Amino acid sequence: MGEVVRVLETMATVDEEDRLILDERLPLQAKARVRVLIFIPEEEDIPEDQWLQAASKNPVFSFLEEPEEDIYSLADGRPFHDAR
């Protein structure tokens, strides 16, 4: 069976020396090792070209390269013309 963990959430500030300064004390024994996950808010949306580049290199989509997934040709469907 896996490791049992307790999850705590608090906010922190990163100082000039890249150290985390927690907003509150944690209910832990002294010198305990902890696992830290850092969630950094994005200032803006990721540009579409970066999303496309990340998706094209992501191995989760590698199944699309298999021959049985290649089911469409240029002769399928009808052209779409945006009427803007």
Image: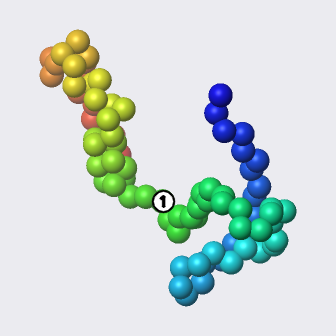
Q: In the shown orientation, is residue 24 left or right of residue 32?
A: right
For residue 39, what is the image quadrant? bottom right
**Looking at the image, which residue is at 76% across and 64% down?**
10
Image location (x, y in percent) of residue 75: 15, 17
Would residue 72 be seen by someone viewing this image from the given angle? no
Q: Report the amino acid beneath label 1.
A: Asp
Q: Quadrant of the N terminus?
A: top right
Q: In the shown orientation, is residue 14 left or right of residue 24?
A: left
Answer above or below: position of 5 versus 33. above
Residue reaching furthest right?
27
**For mark 1, does the 10 Å Cα neighbourhood hold few (<14), some (14 to 19), or many (20 or more) residues?**
few
**Looking at the image, which residue is at 25% across and 17% down?**
69
Front residue of 50/34: it is 34
Image location (x, y in percent) of residue 3: 66, 38
Secondary structure under tag 1 reads loop
Residue behind mark 1: 45
Q: In the shown orientation, is residue 9 left or right of residue 80?
A: right
**Looking at the image, which residue is at 33% across and 31% down?**
61
For residue 37, what is the image quadrant? bottom right
Answer above or below: position of 82 versus 17. above
Image location (x, y in percent) of residue 60: 36, 32
